[in-house]
Image: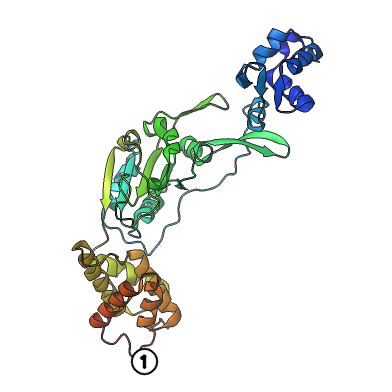
């Protein structure tokens, strides 16, 4: 039995939980005080964090887990290389050069990238890190993402309670680039990142440790909106982000779709990677997408064809070998009217697309 001065909150709470459950009263504490040979006031003092109301203390499972944590133990680190792989099909465009300069500088400079879906926001960050040999930790944000997901928490490992770093702490300690992907889907729980967005690191309340950012650490966020929600409903689920949170991003890049020529180069690279040689199809697809986007910008239609969807079409072409079928199966996601208008527009651009003799061109 521990001496009076050595009695810890963990020992006392564990005894009470085992004997009386998680909700305890004055009589339970008096009995525990007798058991450990301490005064009632001493026992109450040890349990001050569990006080609910007069005569009632609540020892929840989570609190008990944290109170029994006595050493800064952590889950064994797994050595791994977090530098993204270089993609030979990547074609830089838009803000890529500036983004690469920010990462290369090593200066802490939180960056927000906004733009339409499927225009390479995340891919550009990954490839910038790949080219610069910088580690990247990507976190896909949802409405459910909270402090435990981001910062870390206690985990039970082989019956022992250990601290497990979240992706944010991991990025801080490694000096990696932290990518908050689809950040406009977050709730106000993401405000736990405020001090981190100021470059000050984070204090781990549950372990009493402060984590300072290692040199090179930076935060980049991507979103379809500017953190003000989506009025037209195109990006349902996006939220209005706290203004104080948004203000901590030093700059915002507005990413547009690539130009037709650049997009054609992207599609040609994907085609060659798939063993295709049909450059004409790549050119017509990029022209088709450009016309659709201009019509969308003028308010003529409610949907666009993204670069990502063009890549889907090229991959479908590698499978089915027919241009129009590849387009049809990839635009079926749109409503009937939009789908039909897209198909009719392509038919005008490529008069041979529906020919039965349309066969796939591949590398020998």
Report x, y in % for residue 149: 52, 41
Mark 1: secondary structure = loop
Question: Which residue shows up at 67% across the image and 38% down it?
Answer: 156
Res. 214 in view: no
**Residue at the far front in the pictured view:** 54
Q: Is residue 280 shown above or below 125?
A: below
- Residue 161 figure quarter: top right
Q: Is residue 150 left or right of residue 278?
A: right
**Residue at the far left in the pictured view:** 298
Question: Which residue, given by chain and number where applicable, does mark 1 sit on?
Answer: 356
Report x, y in % for residue 262: 26, 65
Q: Is residue 259 shown above or below 352?
A: above
Which quarter shows the C terminus? bottom left
Which quarter shows the N terminus? top right
Residue 147 or residue 249, whichever sits in front: 147
Question: Which residue shows up at 54% across the image and 37% down it?
Answer: 148
Residue 299 or residue 273, whichever sits in front: 299
Question: Which residue shows up at 41% across the image and 47% down it?
Answer: 185
Which color scheme does this rendered protein use?
rainbow
Res. 9 in view: yes
Report x, y in % for residue 304: 29, 65
- Residue 344 figure quarter: bottom left
């Amino acid at each position: 039995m521990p001496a009076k001065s050595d009695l810890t909150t963990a020992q006392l709470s564990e005894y009470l939980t085992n004997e009386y459950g998680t909700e305890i009263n004055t009589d339970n504490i008096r009995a525990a005080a007798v058991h450990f040979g301490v005064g009632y006031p001493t026992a109450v003092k040890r349990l001050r964090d569990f006080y609910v109301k007069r005569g009632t203390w609540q020892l929840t499972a989570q609190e008990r887990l944290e109170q029994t944590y006595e050493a800064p133990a952590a889950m064994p680190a797994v050595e791994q290389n977090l530098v993204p792989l270089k993609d030979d099909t990547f074609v830089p465009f838009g803000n890529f050069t500036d983004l690469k300069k920010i990462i290369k500088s090593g200066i802490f400079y939180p960056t927000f990238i906004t733009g339409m879906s499927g225009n390479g926001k995340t891919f550009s960050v990954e490839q910038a890190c790949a080219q610069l040999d910088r580690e990247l930790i990507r976190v896909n944000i949802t409405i459910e993402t909270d402090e435990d997901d981001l910062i870390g928490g206690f985990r039970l490992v082989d019956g022992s309670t250990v601290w497990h770093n979240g992706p944010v702490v991991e990025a801080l300690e490694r000096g990696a680039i932290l990518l908050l992907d689809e950040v406009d889907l977050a709730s106000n729980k993401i405000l736990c990142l405020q001090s981190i967005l100021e470059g000050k690191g984070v204090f781990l309340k549950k372990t009493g440790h402060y984590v300072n950012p290692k040199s090179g650490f930076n935060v980049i966020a991507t979103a379809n909106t500017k953190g003000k929600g989506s009025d037209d409903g195109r990006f349902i689920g996006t939220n209005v982000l706290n203004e104080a949170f948004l203000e901590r991003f030093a700059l915002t890049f507005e990413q547009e779709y690539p130009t037709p020529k650049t997009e054609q180069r992207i599609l040609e690279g994907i085609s060659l990677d798939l063993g295709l040689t049909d450059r004409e199809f790549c050119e017509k697809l990029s022209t088709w997408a450009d016309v659709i986007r201009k019509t969308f910008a003028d308010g003529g239609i409610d949907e666009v064809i993204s670069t990502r969807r063009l890549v889907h079409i090229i991959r479908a072409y590698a499978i089915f070998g027919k241009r129009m079928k590849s387009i049809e199966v990839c635009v079926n996601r749109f409503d009937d009217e939009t789908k039909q208008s897209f198909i009719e527009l392509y038919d005008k651009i490529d008069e041979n697309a529906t020919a039965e003799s349309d066969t796939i061109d591949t590398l020998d």
